Image (cartoon, coloured by chain):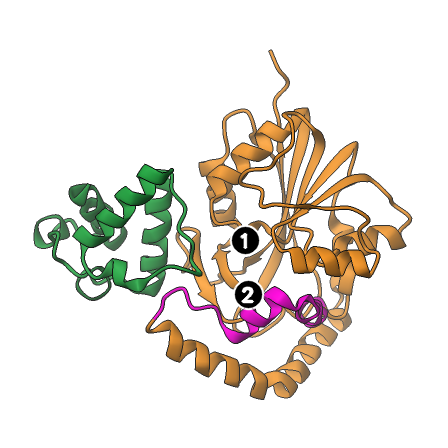
Amino acid sequence: MNAMNSPARVGIAKFAYVVFLIVLYPFYYYVKKDFMRQVKKNLFYPSRFVSYSETRPVYYDVFAFFVNFPLFDKVYRVLPPLTGRVLQVGCGTGLMNRYLKKQGILPDMVNLDPNIHSLKYAMKWKRIDSFLQSGIEKVDLPDQSFDTILMARCFHHIRSTRKALSECSRLLKPGGKLIIFDPVLLDRKHEITEAYMANSTIDGFIWRYSEECLVRHVRKFTPPELPVTDIRAVRLPITTNYCFKYEHKDMIITLTKTEEV
Amino acid sequence: MIEKVIKLISEIRDDEALVTELNGNSDIVNETGMDSLQLINFILRIEDEFGIDFDFEEFDMAHLESIERFCRFIENKVDVA
């Protein structure tokens, strides 16, 4: 346990979770009840919360406030330094950009997201000053454009891991790094045998995995020239990591593009 | 293609008997025994296997009423791709 995870900090995260649960339960119950009814008829039904937050990014910011409490955007301080030209995949409402700005770090960064509402919202709040509306499966940019590609808490949303990692490999310069920062389930009972995708009430279609399953999942789909070179796990003292039903921790996986022969 | 899809279902269910039990008329949702998570991951395996993308927002569950019908849907997608 490091200083960041002192008993007091963990206690605050757990207490905050209980308070949020009590306050938000009526809303959650309403959304969940509708979702359970509809998803029986349509496997792909997006919950009302997911539908609303697609077009109203402020919902996502509120969601992020609760799940990252009490660290908020300080969760990004576990990331390694971002060097050279950077592609941020799934920048969303620009929370990480806001953190970097506060730290006085202004990397040469291209911000990518498929959701135009989130991108406009991030622009409106001056968290980003430019963007490219696109998913990572196919990006309209030349080969070897970037030194670093960052997927900060978006990897679990990417449906085709194979296509995404292949495109990252194309976009990275030799020696360039892909950093995947993503939450994983704690899975104390070892019930998860492989990564699986689920339609969730609050976060839509997401991959779920344990620490081992995420690493296996990445290794399964990454092309040979983009191997995994570093794996780290931390457990930030935030509500999402210390909730009762789905305890999480945070993984930081680095893949490095091999130098050309 | 029907055989390929049935083989995929039997792999997901981890039940080799399904290869002989299922046929083109089998209902994917109600007769294969796949739960909702397995169904979603079956769709993802199909996407990966055939190099196609389904639009989840527009996906019509009627395509899953039989394996044969779903195969026709896949074939149309493959042709477009």
Q: Residue at x 20, y 50 (%)?
A: B10
The answer to whether residue A206 is magenta is no
**Chain A, chosen colour in render:** orange
Number of residues whose C-alpha sits closer than 10 Å to that of mark 1, classed few (under 14), some (14–19) or many (20 or more): many
Give the position of the C terminus of chain A as an image quadrant. top right
Q: Residue at x 77, y 60 (%)?
A: A73
Q: CA distance from mark 1 to mark 2?
A: 10 Å
Say which quarter of the image contains residue A41: bottom left
**Circles 1 and 2: CB atoms closer than 8 Å:** yes
User: B21 left or right of A150?
Assistant: left
Residue, disc 1: A156
**Chain B, chosen colour in render:** green
Residue, disc 2: A203
Q: Please tell me which residue lies in front, A23 or A39.
A: A39
Q: Please tell me which residue lies in front, A95 or A216.
A: A95
- Residue A237 x/y as whole percent: 71, 65
- Establish if A116 lies above or below A225: below
Q: Chain of mark 1?
A: A
Q: Chain of mark 2?
A: A
Tell me the SS state at disc 2. Answer: loop
Q: Which residues are drawn in magenta? A: A42-68
Q: Amino acid at mark 2?
A: Asp
Q: Residue at x 55, y 81 (%)?
A: A28
Q: Going by the picture, which residue comes out furthest to the left?
A: B20
- Establish if A179 lies above or below A37: above
